[in-house]
Image: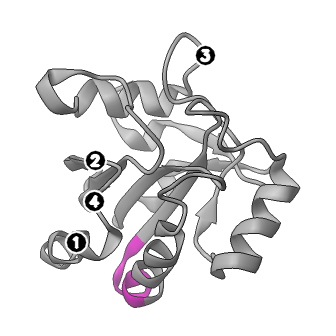
């Protein structure tokens, strides 16, 4: 596929969401986990969502259990955890794989178009972030240790 808008993904409630519905929005796509050292980033991600959603930021969270089995729950448990602990109101999707043969096609696309450090494509850990402009172009890939607040300036430029 040639654009991010050609992909679909299943939300936590089981509904298929076409990414084309985010056309014209800036997107921040993040692989998440509920039991990770970076899990507290949910608070910062939610803050970005609250601050920028009305201006056109769509934040998309994709739970993944590939790194240290840090996302063991099912969709109901993931949703409850995110809401209860961090008040997450941005779009969360069903658990996926982000690396390997079973990687979700969206993540195959993202990692192909925006490889990480040293040109390596694989996602290295939870909370890797991809920032896309209003036309669906990947602007930047952020390492897991980059705090959501540190992405604000880049988001501002795109809004």
Mark 2 surroundings within 10 Å by alpha-carbon count, few (fewer than 14), some (14 through 19), many (20 or more)? some
Secondary structure mainly formed by the magenta segment: helix
Specify the label residue 92 is tagged with: none
Display coloring: one colour
Name the mark nearer the viewer: 4 or 3.
4
4 or 3: tag closer to the N-terminus: 3
- Mark 3 to mark 1 CA distance (whole Å): 31 Å
1 or 2: tag closer to the N-terminus: 2
Considering the numbered disc 3 on the image, is that residue within a helix, a strand or a loop? loop
Quarter of the image with the C terminus in it:
bottom left
Q: Which residue is mark 4?
A: 146
Considering the numbered disc 1 on the image, is that residue within a helix, a strand or a loop? helix
> Residue at 65% across / 53% down in the picture?
35
Q: Which residue is mark 2?
A: 143
User: Is residue 64 left or right of 158 when viewed as pictured?
Assistant: right
Specify the label residue 102 is tagged with: 3
Q: Are circles 4 and 1 on residues that touch, CB within 8 Å?
A: yes
**Residue 52 forms part of the magenta stretch:** yes
Q: Are circles 4 and 2 on residues that touch, CB within 8 Å?
A: yes
Considering the numbered disc 2 on the image, is that residue within a helix, a strand or a loop? loop
Q: Nearer the viewer, residue 154 or 2?
A: 154
Quarter of the image with the N terminus in it:
top left
- Mark 2 to mark 3 CA distance (whole Å): 22 Å
User: Is residue 119 left or right of 32 when viewed as pictured?
Assistant: left
- Mark 4 to mark 1 CA distance (whole Å): 7 Å
> Residue at 34% across / 36% down in the picture?
3
Give the residues drawn in magenta, as a range.
51-57
Specify the label residue 150 is tagged with: 1
- Mark 4 to mark 3 CA distance (whole Å): 26 Å
2 or 3: tag closer to the N-terminus: 3
Q: Position of residue 44 (x, y in %)?
A: 43, 76
Q: Quadrant of residue 47?
A: bottom left
């Amino acid at each position: 596929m040639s654009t991010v808008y050609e992909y679909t993904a299943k939300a936590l409630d089981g509904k298929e969401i076409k990414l084309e519905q985010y056309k014209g929005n800036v997107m921040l796509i993040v692989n998440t986990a509920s039991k990770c050292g970076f899990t507290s980033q949910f608070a910062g991600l939610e803050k970005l969502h609250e601050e920028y959603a009305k201006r056109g930021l769509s934040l998309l969270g994709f739970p993944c259990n590939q790194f240290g089995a840090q996302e063991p729950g099912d969709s109901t448990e993931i949703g409850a955890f995110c809401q209860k602990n961090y008040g997450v109101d941005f779009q969360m999707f069903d658990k996926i794989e982000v690396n390997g043969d079973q990687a979700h096609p969206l993540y195959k696309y993202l990692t192909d178009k925006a490889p990480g450090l040293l040109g390596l494509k694989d996602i290295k850990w939870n909370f890797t972030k991809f920032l896309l402009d209003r036309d669906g172009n990947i602007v930047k890939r952020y390492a897991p240790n980059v705090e959501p607040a540190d992405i604000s300036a880049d988001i501002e430029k795109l809004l």
